[in-house]
Image (cartoon, grey):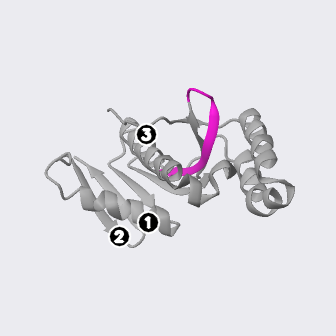
Amino acid sequence: MDKGFNYSMRELNEQRVDIILEEWRNIAGEDEFSLELEPMFDWCRSHTEQKDGDSRAWELYDPKSDECCAIVEIVDSRRGGLSKLLKLFVTPRFWDMDNNRKCVIEIYMATFFEVTKKGILVGAERVKLYGRTDLMLSILTSIHARSMEASWPKNIKAGIEGRWLTLSFS
């Protein structure tokens, strides 16, 4: 499965959460970090292991630099038939959308690819990607539009359900 992205996804552990927390605090500054990111890192600490039916924290990172580009919240159904991308938190390094739009879109696309790949690898029949923000929703809508093209794999069906893009595998 050739992705064409410069990012990979891995499970988070508490040690890695602490490293990313300090990196992002230094980038964002104390006030912004406290308001925007501290609650997310509190959540990450309690979601580094898979618990039946609960969401888990993952890291999208650049394998060349080992730098975290996003924290991702994913939940897998108890029976393993469904994986859902719930939230994506992009590093504050890319918060300036005027200068980083292309990087942020690539991070979103790489995350969608990695979540879909993870779902396939665990035997999920469906993967659902949630368009929490307008940017995420517009990217998901574009993916859905591409699924109508002849070059789209015939064994993957795509559908929009509200703010969700659902990919079904056959």
Residue 9 highlighted magenta (yes or no): no
Residue designated by label 1: 137
Mark 3–mark 2 Cα distance, whole angstroms, equals: 21 Å
Q: How crowded is mark 2: few (under 14 residues within 10 Å), some or many (20 or more)?
A: few
Q: How crowded is mark 1: few (under 14 residues within 10 Å), some or many (20 or more)?
A: some
Mark 3–mark 1 Cα distance, whole angstroms, equals: 21 Å
Closer to the eye: label 3 or 1: 1
Dot 3 or dot 1: first in sequence order is 3
Residue kind at label 1, given as amino acid type: Leu
Quarter-of-image position of residue 33: bottom right
Q: Is mark 2 on a helix, strand or loop?
A: strand
Which mark identifies residue 118?
A: 3
Q: Residue furthest left?
A: 150
Q: Residue furthest bottom?
A: 162
Closer to the eye: label 1 or 2: 1
Left/right placement of residue 137 relative to residue 168 reads right
Left/right placement of residue 158 relative to residue 76 reads left
Residue 44 locus on image (x, y percent): 70, 48
Q: Main secondary structure of the magenta part?
A: strand
Which mark identifies residue 161?
A: 2
Q: Where does the magenta region start and end?
A: 63-77
Q: Residues within 10 Å of mark 3 (few under 14, many from 20)?
A: some
Q: Is residue 157 visible?
A: yes
Residue 87 locus on image (x, y percent): 56, 57
Residue kind at label 2, given as amino acid type: Glu
Q: Is mark 1 on a helix, strand or loop?
A: helix
Tag 3 and tag 2, C-beta contact below 8 Å:
no
Which mark identifies residue 17?
A: none
Q: Nearer the viewer, residue 17 or 43?
A: 17
Residue kind at label 3, given as amino acid type: Lys
